[in-house]
Image (cartoon, rainbow, N blue to C red):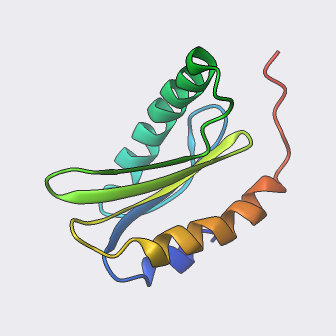
């Protein structure tokens, strides 16, 4: 599957690929389904933020909580991301997500009209 490369990265506990309808295409790890649902919700907020700020499309998001680090990419109609144990080095996950973004970007676009 597309996200298998993320499972071997130290610190990654969950990963997800979410389609334009908000449903998970793929999820891995403990909390993968929850990550998928939250990525779908974040996508809506990112789209709204880009419009309201007039900044264009927001394509990358990273945040840290008490327990995890999350890195995510919006690619066309898709959202993909990984959750890592807090204080993990996220560079490997970010690089893997960037490589996956090229594959995901070739998936068919969805007409939202």
Q: Is residue 36 above or below residue 30?
A: above
Residue 81 on image: x %, y % = 49, 56
- Quarter the C terminus occupies: top right
Q: Is residue 107 above or below residue 111?
A: below
Q: Is residue 68 visible?
A: yes
In the image, what residue occupies the spot 53% across and 30% down? 46
Residue 56 on image: x %, y % = 68, 30
- Quarter the N terminus occupies: bottom right
Q: Is residue 3 visible?
A: no
Residue 20 on image: x %, y % = 67, 35
In the image, what residue occupies the spot 40% across and 38% down? 38
Left or right of 67: which side holds 109? right
Q: Is residue 9 above or below residue 17?
A: below
Q: Nearer the viewer, residue 48 or 100?
A: 48
Corner quadrant of residue 22: top right
Residue lying at the far left in this picture: please name it. Answer: 66
Left or right of 93: which side holds 112? right
Left or right of 92: which side holds 17? right
Corner quadrant of residue 53: top right
Mark count: 0
In the image, what residue occupies the spot 39% across and 48% down? 35
Q: Nearer the viewer, residue 84 or 89?
A: 89
Residue 34 on image: x %, y % = 35, 45
In the image, what residue occupies the spot 78% across and 54% down? 105
Q: Nearer the viewer, residue 109 or 47?
A: 47
């Amino acid at each position: 599957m597309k996200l298998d490369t993320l499972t071997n990265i130290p610190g990654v506990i969950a990963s997800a690929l979410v389609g334009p309808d908000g449903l998970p295409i793929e999820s891995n790890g403990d909390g993968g389904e929850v990550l998928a649902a939250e990525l779908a919700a974040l996508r809506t907020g990112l789209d709204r933020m880009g419009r309201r700020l007039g900044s264009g499309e927001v394509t990358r998001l990273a945040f840290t909580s008490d327990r995890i680090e999350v890195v995510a990419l919006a690619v066309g109609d898709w959202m993909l991301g990984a959750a890592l144990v807090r204080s993990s080095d996220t560079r490997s996950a970010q690089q893997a997500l960037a490589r996956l973004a090229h594959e995901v970007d070739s998936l068919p676009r969805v007409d939202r009209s």
